Image (cartoon, grey):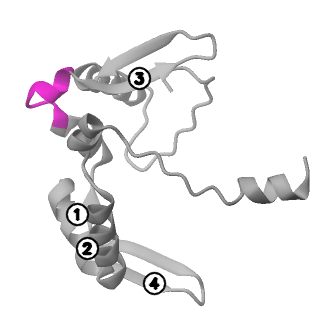
Amino acid sequence: MSQESISVLMEEKRTFPPKKEFSEKAHIKSMEEYEKIYKRSVEDPEGFWAELAENMLIWQKKWDKVLSYNFQKPEIKWFIGGKLNVSVNCIDRHLNDSTRNKAAIIWEGDDGSYKTYTYQQLYYEVNKFANVLKKLGVKKGDRVTIYLPMIPEL
């Protein structure tokens, strides 16, 4: 391949817009909307992320400060003083409506096999494993390491 053809490939200008039906179902429906959201995120990062965190997550304790950063160290801290429960936000909040029957995880193996877990099934499996850990004496604050192949239970 010549340097000229590599150069030509690096200057790709074509775009491939999504189908209208796809865009209508998207959270961000246009490039203009994306650019407006992006602009706000860089001009007012604390306000932007505070609004998203407030509207999209369930907090056990609301944060005291959204963002603290020092690029000299480097050190970046988000939602200082806030407390979340990952399981509540990823699983539990989807159990109170028809979302509980929608796919939470779609796993596909190297051999083409697949398994789907709904939010309800995932909740059941997570709680089953939590009880196994309790029976083994694992307590809050303990560290647990699990080594598994790439299987859906991972």
Of label 3 and label 2, which has the lower sequence position? 2
- Picture quarter containing residue 127? top left
Q: Which secondary structure type mostly characterizes the magenta part of the structure?
A: helix
Query: Disc 4 versus disc 1: distance between alpha carbons?
Result: 19 Å
Observer-nearest of 116 and 27? 27
x and y percentages locating residue 8 in the rendered image: 75, 56
Residue placed under numbered mark 1 in the picture? 52
Pair 4/2: label in front? 2
Residue placed under numbered mark 3 in the picture? 106
Q: Residue furthest left?
A: 97
Q: Which mark is residue 69?
A: 4
Query: Disc 3 versus disc 2: distance between alpha carbons?
Result: 31 Å
The magenta stretch is: 94-101
Residue placed under numbered mark 2 in the picture? 48
Q: Give the residue at x 27% y 43%.
A: 23
Tell me if residue 65 can be seen: no
Q: Give the residue at x 52% y 39%.
A: 144
Q: Is residue 136 left or right of residue 75?
A: left
Please tell me whether mark 3 sits on a helix, a strand or a loop: strand
